[in-house]
Amino acid sequence: MVEVPAVAVELAELLAVTLGAGAASAVGIVLERFGLSAASTGDLMLGAWAVAMGLLALYVGVVALGYEQALPRLRRLAAGE
C-alpha cells in the first residue's frame, strides 16, 4: 500500500475547505441579491428570508470555513508543521 505524505493530505484538506468557503460565499451573495430584488418588488417575506439565508451562507463561507478553518491550515503549512 502506498503511503500518502502528510503534506499532500493537508493540501487536499485546505483545497476542499477553500472551495467550500468560496461556494458558500457565492451562494450567500446570490441570495443577498435575490432577497434585495424581491424586497424591492414588494415581496417582503421572501426578501427577508433570502437576505437572512444569504447572511447565514456568508457567515459560513467567510467566518466558519475561511477564517476558522482555512486560515489556520494555511498558517500551519507555511510554518512547515
Image (cartoon, rainbow, N blue to C red):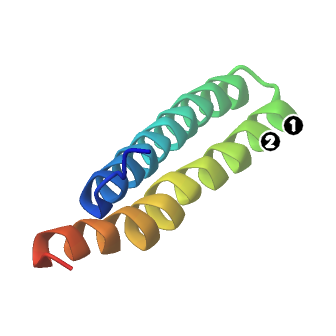
* Residue drawn at x 24%, y 76% as measured from the top left: 76
Query: Position of 10 compared to 45: left or right?
Result: left
**Residue 70: image location, x then y, percent:** 36, 62
Tell me if 58 is positioned left or right of 17 in this view: right
Q: Residue at x 71, y 24 (%)?
A: 38
**Numbered disc 1: secondary structure:** helix
In front of the other: 5 or 36: 5
Determine the residue positioned at 32% across, 68% down.
73
Q: Is residue 78 above or below residue 16?
A: below
Q: Are marks 2 and 1 in contact (CB under 8 Å)?
A: yes
Label number found at residue 49: 2
Q: Quadrant of residue 45?
A: top right
Q: Residues within 10 Å of mark 1 (few under 14, many from 20)?
A: few
The label nearer to you, 2 versus 1, is: 2
Q: Position of residue 42 (x, y in %)?
A: 78, 24
Q: Specify the quadrant of the image occupied by residue 62.
A: bottom left
Q: Residue furthest right?
A: 45
The amino acid on which the numbered mark 2 sits, given as a three-letter code, is: Trp
Residue 30, x across and y down, in percent? 54, 28
Identify the residue position indicated by label 1 in the image. Answer: 45
Residue 50 % position (x, y): 73, 37
Q: What amino acid does circle 1 point to?
A: Met
Residue at the extreme top: 41
